Amino acid sequence: MATVGWCTLPGGVDEYLARRRQARADSASASSGGARRGDTRAGRRELARLEREVDKLVRREDELHAELAEHATDADRVMALDATLREARTRREKLEENWMGLAHELEGTDPA
């Protein structure tokens, strides 16, 4: 029989080693859970950032539509605004795809 600290181990060294392995395994699983929570928090912050960017681009698209209506008789201006609008729309769609992918990833790791 071995005595470790304040506890007595009837199984001796073998029990001590088994408990030590279990404690390490428990510690490893707890730390990986913390990493997931940290990853989830970072992921949520990234989702919020993407949402803000999408909102900005939606507002920009609205502004461009208004400018298109205002300058409807100026063909050169309309072409330039249309190109800018297409770029904004493409960027917004890419951000929305990124948002959807990240949201899908976080869906499986969200502890709440």
Image (cartoon, helix red, strand yellow):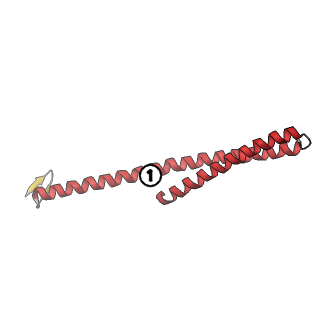
The x, y position of residue 60, in whole percent, is: 74, 43
Apparent side of residue 34 relative to residue 81 in the rendered image (left or right)? left
Residue type marked 1:
Arg
Helix, strand or loop for disc 1: helix
Apparent side of residue 52 relative to residue 73 in the rendered image (left or right)? left
Task: Using the rendered view, name the quadrant where residue 23 is placed.
Answer: bottom left
Apparent side of residue 97 relative to residue 84 in the rendered image (left or right)? left
Q: Residue furthest left?
A: 1
Tell me what residue is drawn at x 35 percent, y 53 percent: 30
Tell me what residue is drawn at x 74 percent, y 46 percent: 86
The x, y position of residue 91, in whole percent, is: 67, 45
Is 12 above or below relative to 91?
below
The x, y position of residue 101, in whole percent, is: 56, 54
Q: How many marks?
A: 1
Category of crowding for the residue at label 1, using alpha-carbon neighbours closer than 10 angstroms: few (below 14), some (14–19), many (at least 20): some
Q: Quadrant of the N terminus?
A: bottom left
Of 32 and 111, nearer the camera is 32
Tell me what residue is drawn at x 16 percent, y 55 percent: 17
Of 105 and 82, nearer the camera is 82
Apparent side of residue 37 relative to residue 28 in the rendered image (left or right)? right
Q: Residue furthest right?
A: 73
Is 5 above or below relative to 73?
below
Of 71 and 52, nearer the camera is 71
Q: Quickly name the residue at label 1.
A: 37
